[in-house]
Image: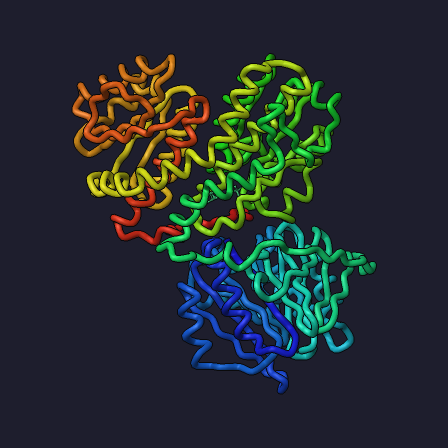
């Protein structure tokens, strides 16, 4: 979703602004813009609909040597994607970029009679509001401060003024903002990836904080204008992690690097010799772990499906544990009840998803302990949970989530093992889980290298279809839903994921020549049942592509048989095959794999 960059210092601002916006492209957007202010106090405002490369062409024609500026990538909420609606927005002497939603914008707008509104955005209202309070006796910082007291909604903002070209004012409430510090250079970004290579020292703004950023210093305040001391943290991501490194797409890179990223998730946490797990960030004593009776898992999209798969593992690992898994967008408006001795697992790659964050806050308000399973270090959810596990999968750039899923499932499983350890239950199954987790990275490595080309071939066969049905039983049910999600996100093929046993209660009516089916089967006690479902689909003229670990005979148009020693965690391997399948389908259809239409990587608005 929307991205913010800014900088002030001695270097040409345009270079960082354009470079930074390119880094934020992965978040999903539809227009972009920058403004710089010259030493003559004149502003150069450039905006373009579409890609940052369009904006870059404009910038090349309008080179500016000014050393202060702000920029934005916009993901339309209020008003269509257009050059006019693109940020920065101008009001009087100020320019503003905004992430989030100003909920009372209509009310505010009706009182701002002097400003001639030219956009349909809520953000222009905020710019006009600040301008209306910015008279000759007021500083920009004070005008921003007063305006924010009148605003209802969420925001991350950066504001500049031609009257005070020595500072950028930033503020946050619900939308992340990070200030990067270097000698004589201060950077602003809504996402740490825009700062990598420029500086690794950063201040993460908290909700209700604002800052006056100058080239050689940052002054932090709360909205009551009280000074706050800044905590400078180190960003630990390197350049390599945000580059394609020879792959055609980030998505393929992220699928292929799963052995490495999963090793980082497991590293130092599982011990295969004494068959134990230690997650040091849970902030729970053994007594507290022993007391857990119920786990509520929340997440959105792929994180939700990781939670769903994780719940099957948790209930196998911990005797008597009850679990519910709910999509955060649903839970936040439900009258839900949390039994006593509940722990909430909050799953999010970005750590910024608005619905997930809202649930976290509600659960905390009820006094229930929360644990995060988070990838993005320093993200809002990671900062607000009581404890948790960083999955350490590294930056996930492609909009469709892949490596984060695998690491999230591993983290939930390790959590289950740690609870089981504390309770002293299920020792045998625990040791099997630990052995399989330890082997999983190597197994994924084999799957990717051995089946990549075969999957690409199979994808060519199905790339012309417009409808797909994925089905699997037990642990393969969440995998079927995740497979369908991946396919629809990047290939735009209508895809549904179903529990195989539910097929005859409706979806089997869909089977015809316009559909193909992805059947997921594991050679376990449910194999014969899964085979029956497959036969039923075949009998109705289905076009089945089966993915299995079984050597037994399977009637299907295409079969990929993975050869693996894993048993309980085999669904994760089947998912890797599905990830590759979705990728090659999208490539075959000529789609924008890493930035699929209409989607955003980090959904920071409702
Ligand atoms: C968006 C992304 C999905 C992701 C979901 C949850 O919809 O496009 O790929 O699974 O958000 O994101 P999170 O960062 O909370 O895991």
Residue 470 found in image quarter: top left
Q: In this view, does 157 lie above or below 47?
A: above
Residue at 47% across, 70% down: 47
Q: Can residue 85 be seen in this view?
A: no
Q: Position of residue 313 (x, y in %)?
A: 52, 22
Residue furthest toward the bottom? 40
Residue 579 found in image quarter: top left
Compared across the picture, whether 158 is left or right of 259 comes to right
Q: In this view, does 284 lie above or below 166?
A: above
Q: Position of residue 335 (x, y in %)?
A: 61, 26
Q: Nearer the viewer, residue 205 or 569?
A: 569
Q: In this view, does 276 lie above or below 25?
A: above
Residue at 49% across, 81% down: 63
Q: Where is residue 368 in the image (x, y as percent from the top left)?
A: 70, 28
Residue at 67% across, 63% down: 170
Q: Can residue 433 be seen in this view?
A: yes
Compared across the picture, whether 103 is left or right of 396 comes to right
Q: Nearer the viewer, residue 281 or 299?
A: 281
């Amino acid at each position: 979703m929307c991205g913010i960059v800014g900088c002030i210092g001695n270097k040409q601002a345009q270079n960082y602004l354009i470079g930074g916006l390119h880094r934020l492209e992965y978040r999903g957007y539809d227009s972009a813009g920058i403004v710089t202010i010259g030493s003559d106090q004149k502003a150069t405002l450039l905006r373009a609909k579409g890609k940052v490369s369009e904006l870059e062409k404009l910038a090349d024609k309008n080179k500016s040597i000014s050393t202060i500026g702000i920029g934005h990538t916009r993901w339309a909420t209020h008003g269509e994607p257009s050059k006019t609606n693109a940020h920065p927005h101008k009001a009087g002497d100020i320019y503003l970029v905004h992430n989030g939603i100003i909920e009372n914008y209509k009310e505010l707008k009706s009182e701002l009679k002097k400003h001639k509104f030219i956009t349909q955005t809520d953000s222009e209202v905020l710019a006009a509001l600040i301008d209306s309070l910015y008279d000759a006796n007021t500083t920009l910082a004070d005008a921003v401060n007063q305006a924010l007291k009148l605003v209802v909604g969420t925001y991350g903002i950066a504001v500049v003024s031609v009257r005070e070209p020595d500072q950028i004012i930033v503020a946050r409430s619900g939308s992340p903002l990070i200030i990067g510090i270097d000698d004589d250079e201060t950077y602003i970004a809504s996402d740490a990836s825009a700062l990598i290579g420029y500086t690794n020292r950063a201040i993460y703004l908290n909700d209700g904080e604002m800052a006056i950023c100058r080239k050689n210093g940052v002054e932090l305040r709360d909205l009551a204008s009280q000074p706050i001391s800044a905590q400078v943290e180190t960003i630990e991501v390197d350049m390599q992690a945000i580059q394609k490194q020879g792959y055609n797409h980030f998505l393929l890179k992220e699928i292929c690097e799963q052995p490495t990223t999963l090793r980082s998730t497991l590293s130092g946490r599982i011990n295969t010799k004494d068959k134990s797990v230690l997650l040091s960030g849970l902030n729970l004593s053994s007594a507290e772990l022993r007391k857990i009776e119920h786990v509520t898992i929340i997440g959105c999209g792929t994180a939700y499906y990781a939670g769903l798969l994780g719940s099957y593992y948790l209930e196998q690992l911990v005797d008597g544990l009850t679990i519910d898994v709910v999509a955060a967008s649903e839970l936040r408006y439900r009258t839900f009840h949390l039994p006593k001795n509940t722990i909430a697992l909050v799953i999010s790659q970005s750590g910024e998803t608005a619905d997930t964050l809202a649930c976290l806050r509600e659960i905390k308000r009820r006094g229930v302990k929360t644990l995060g399973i988070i990838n993005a270090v320093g993200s809002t959810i990671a900062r607000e949970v009581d404890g948790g596990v960083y999955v350490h999968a590294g930056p996930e750039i492609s909009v469709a989530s892949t490596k984060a899923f695998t690491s999230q499932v591993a983290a939930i499983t390790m959590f289950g093992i740690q609870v089981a350890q504390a309770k002293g239950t299920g020792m045998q199954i625990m040791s099997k889980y630990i052995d399989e987790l330890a082997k999983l990275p190597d197994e994924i490595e084999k799957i990717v290298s051995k089946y990549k080309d075969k999957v690409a071939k199979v994808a060519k066969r199905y790339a012309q279809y417009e409808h797909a049905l994925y089905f699997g039983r037990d642990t393969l049910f969440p995998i079927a839903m995740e497979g369908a999600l991946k396919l629809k996100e990047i290939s735009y093929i209508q895809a549904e994921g179903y529990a195989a046993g539910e097929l005859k209660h409706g979806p089997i009516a869909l089977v015809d020549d316009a559909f193909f089916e992805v059947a997921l089967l594991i050679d376990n006690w449910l194999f014969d049942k899964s085979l029956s479902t497959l036969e039923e689909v075949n009998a109705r003229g289905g076009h089945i592509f089966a993915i299995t670990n079984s050597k037994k005979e399977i009637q299907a148009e295409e079969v990929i048989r993975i050869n693996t020693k894993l048993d309980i965690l085999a669904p994760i391997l089947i998912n890797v095959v599905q990830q590759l399948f979705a990728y090659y389908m999208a490539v075959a259809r000529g789609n924008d794999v890493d930035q699929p239409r209409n989607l955003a990587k980090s959904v920071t608005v409702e």
